[in-house]
Amino acid sequence: MTTPTPTRSRVPAGVRTGGQFAVEARGEADVDLATAPPNEPAGEELAETVFTRRYDSVEDKVAAFHAELEQRVSELAHDENWLAYLDTMAKFHRYSMLNTLLIAAQRPGATKVAGFRKWKDELGRHVRKGEKGISIFAPKTRRVPVTDAAGNPVKGENGKAKYEVRCIGFTTTTVFDVSQTDGPEMPAVTHDLSGEPPAGFTQDLEAAITAQGYTIGSEDLPGTARGYTDPRGKRVVVEASLSPAMRAKVLAHELGHIACGHTERLEEYHSGHRGGRGQMEVEAESVAYALCRANGMSTQVGDVSGTYVAGWAGPAGSEAVKASANAVAKATRTVLESQPWRNVE
């Protein structure tokens, strides 16, 4: 199928753009996300009250944490808080969205966390006396018998009932940052961010895209377009004249669209009534930002700046922000765990 040439024309209400996800130069000056203000807790007193008070039960503690997180999720609509969330997620991409927020709320600046026993028994370090741990959620599991559609127990080849481990809820557990421990020196857990793509980063991005069944091409694109994704033709196209740094950023952005599932929602990719283009662009650029920082590359882009994050949420408010924060976390985790990345810890 012939793919229409990407343009920057205004889209009438209710009309989609033809199924292309484009990265274009914007009129405003780029914003350096790497130097965005850090996320500051609402106050030590609040954090101390919620995260370290004693509760009558684990259920009460989990409920209190969730209530606090609901407020922090709503605050993600503010630009500096969203960027701080992405910074933390880039370092803790294996954690859920809620646990990422818990780590950032209790210990801003954390770089590597583990439980007390893991630090001692596996990593050879010990938590210093008096250090306050970071409370995060952990699944509560139970070994239960496997049953068929009729509710009858399923037996294995040995004739005995089969069992499976099932999550029946959540509890809390405690982890500590490396800065709270002493012991043998560990490899550096943070990168000195570079404006240029580290060795192998562009190749890793290309591998992640082609693993999704897409081909990658370079063309002389019209106007200010830097690249686009064609879901129907399964192609990612990048402007041929881009610098190595910009090429990496554009590839990361298009990979963000693919990983977030935007290419399967073509009918929503427009700026008209009930359109989701703004939200999709925020999510794709957020994944790109996290991927770049996780690989040691700084970014200077405008799509997650100013009022852009708060603007697309609309009447849905914090629920839309929460959905996007969760989508970005899942997409980033899936991409980084799908293959070896030469520059990721």
Image: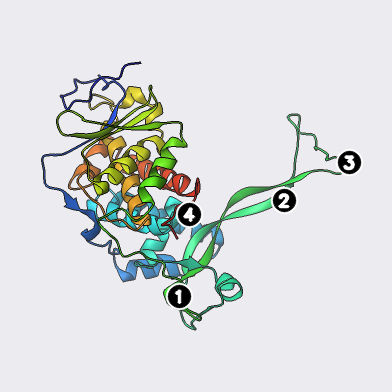
Colour setting: rainbow
Residue 264 sits in quarter: top left
Extreme-bottom residue of the structure: 129
Q: Amino acid at mark 2?
A: Arg
How packed mark 3 is, by other alpha carbons closer than 10 Å (few <14, some 14-19, many 20 or more), is few
Q: Amino acid at mark 1?
A: Lys
Which residue is the site of mark 4?
Answer: 94
Residue 138, placed above or below residue 314: below
Toward the viewer: 244 or 259? 244
Q: How many numbered marks does the figure carry?
A: 4
Q: What is the CA distance from the residue labelled 4 to the residue labelled 1?
A: 22 Å
Q: What is the CA distance from the residue labelled 3 to the residue labelled 1?
A: 49 Å
Q: Amino acid at mark 3?
A: Gly
Query: Measuring 45% from the left and 71% from the top, which residue is drawn there?
Result: 187
Do callouts 1 and 2 mark residues in contact (Cβ within 8 Å)?
no
On-image quarter of the N terminus: top left
Q: What is the CA distance from the residue labelled 4 to the residue labelled 2?
A: 24 Å
Which residue is the site of mark 2?
Answer: 143
Decide which of tag 3 and tag 2 comes sooner along the chain. 2
Q: What is the CA distance from the residue labelled 3 to the residue labelled 2?
A: 18 Å
Which residue is the site of mark 1?
Answer: 132
How packed mark 4 is, by other alpha carbons closer than 10 Å (few <14, some 14-19, many 20 or more), is some
Q: Which mark is residue 159?
A: 3
Instruction: List x then y, in percent, for residue 162.
Output: 79, 43
